[in-house]
Image (tube, coloured by chain):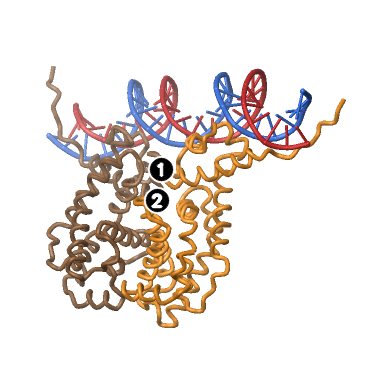
Chain colours: A brown, B orange, C red, D blue
Amino acid sequence: MPTPTARSPRRDALDNRVALIEAARVVFARDPGASLDAIAVEAGLSRRAVYGHFASRDDLQRELVTMGAARIAAALEGIDHEDPVVRLALIAAGIWREVASMRVMALFAIRGNLQAHTVNALAPLRLKVFEAVREGIAAGSVRADIPAERLARLVEDAALAILAESNRSNLSAREGHTLVQLSVLGALGFGWREAEALISNTPELNGTD
Amino acid sequence: MPTPTARSPRRDALDNRVALIEAARVVFARDPGASLDAIAVEAGLSRRAVYGHFASRDDLQRELVTMGAARIAAALEGIDHEDPVVRLALIAAGIWREVASMRVMALFAIRGNLQAHTVNALAPLRLKVFEAVREGIAAGSVRADIPAERLARLVEDAALAILAESNRSNLSAREGHTLVQLSVLGALGFGWREAEALISNTPELNGTD
DNA sequence: ATTAACTTGCACATTGGTGTGCAAGTTATT
DNA sequence: AATAACTTGCACACCAATGTGCAAGTTAAT
C-alpha cells in the first residue's frame, strides 16, 4: 500500500483563479449584481469551477476587494511630496494605474454585504487624501470655501468621475493620467489654466508612467 | 336588480400610489435591486397592495422614471440665459431642486432593463447641457482642453457628485444650491474664486428661490 | 506512464424574489 | 346605511441564482 504522494498544486489552476478575479472585476464593474455564471463565462470556465476556488460568492468578492486594496496600496507606495496639492495629483495618477480595481472597490463601498470590509480597506487611502486636503487648505493653496472633510469626499468623486468616463469612452493611459489630475485639481479649486500650468511645471506630475 | 353604479376612485388610493412612487425613489436610490416588499414597507403598505397599483416591478420603475423626467423638465422650464455658463449654473441649480428624482434616474440610466427608457427621458436635459458647453467653449469662457462631448459628461458627473454628497451628509437646500453650482463651474474650468465671483455677481444664480 | 490535481456536466436541495387568486376585512363615497 | 373601492393575508406556481455531491473527463506534475 503506497503512501499517497503529496503533490504541488497545478499552475493552470492558479491561472484560472486569477482569471476569475479578473473577470469578476470586469463584470462587477458593469453590474454588481451579476451572477457567478456570468463571471465564469467571462473567465472561460464553468460555473462549477468557481466553487473549486472560492467557497461562496461572498468569498470571491472578499478576495477581489482584498487584492484590489493591495494593488492600490502598492500603486501609492512612496508617494510623499511636501506640497499637498502635488501629493493629491500624484495620488490621483497612482489610482489611475489601478482603474479597474478602484472602480469595483468604489461600488462595493456603497452597497453589498462587504461594505464594512471594503470601507476598511479603503480607509488608509481616504486618510491620505483627507490629510493632504487639510494641509492644502491651511497652506492657502486649496479652496477655503468647503470644509476639509467634505472637500476630501468631493475630491474622491472627482477622481471617480474620470474612472467612470474611462468606461464610457476609451481613454488612453496617457489621457487618463492627465484627466484624473485635472479633475482632482479642479475640485481643489484650481482654474483649468492654473491646473495645466501646475502639471507641466511639476516634473513628477508629468511622468509618462 | 339594481345596475352596479360606477363610482369615482377613492382619494386614499391615489395617495398610496404617490407614497409608493416616493418610497421607490428613496429605496431604489440606496439599492436599485431592492425588493418590492422593501418599498411597500417604506410606504407603509403591504407587498400585495403594490400590485393593486402597478402591474409589475418594471411598471413601477417605468412610472418612476417617467414622473422623474417630468419633474426635472418642469424644474428646467424657462431656463434660457444668453451666457452659456450662467445657463449651466442655472440648470445645475434647477436639478438640485429635484435631487431625489435625479439620483434615481442617474442610477437607472446605467443598468437595469429600463436603461433605454431612462436614457431617452434624460436626452433633452443632456442635449441642453451639451449645447451650452459647446457654446461656452466657442465663446472662450469654458475650458478648451477637453472636447465638448466629454466635458458635457464630466459636468453631469460633477453635478451628480453633489447629489451623492447630499445623501452622505445633510445638505441644506441653500448649501446644495450653491455647491452644485460651484461644482459644475469647477468642472467647466473656473477657479474657486472666479466661480464664487460669478455666482455673487449674477443675481439669477443667487435666488434663495 | 502514472497519478494527483483540476474541470466539467448533471442532478439536486435551498433561498429569495415575483406575480396571481381569493376570501375577509376596512374605509371612502354616495 | 349601503356599497363600491381598496387593503390585507394567505395560498400558490414560478423563476433565477446559490451551493453541494458525484462520476467522468482532461491536464499538469512527477
Q: Nearer the viewer, residue B97 or C29?
A: C29
Q: Give the quarter of the figure containing the N terminus of chain B.
A: top right
Q: Residue A20: image x %, image y %?
A: 30, 43
Which chain contains the residue that carries disc 2?
A
Q: CA distance from mark 2 to mark 1?
A: 8 Å
- Few, some or many residues within 10 Å of mark 1 (<14, 14–19, 20+): few
Left or right of D24 in this view: B77: right
Circle number at residue A34: 1
Residue type at the position of mark 2: Arg
Query: Dot 1 falls on which chain?
Result: A
Give the percent coordinates (x, y) of residue A123.
22, 49
Indicate which disc residue A30 carries.
Answer: 2
Q: Is residue A18 above or below residue B6?
A: below
Q: Is residue B186 visible?
A: yes
**Residue depicted at 85% across the width and 31% down the height:** B3
Residue A81 placement, left or right of B104? left
Q: Position of residue A157 (x, y in %)?
A: 32, 58
Tell me which amino acid carries mark 1: Ala
Q: Are marks 2 and 1 on the same chain?
A: yes
Q: Quadrant of residue B175?
A: bottom left
Determine whether label 2 and label 1 are within 8 Å by CB.
Answer: yes
State how many labels appear.
2
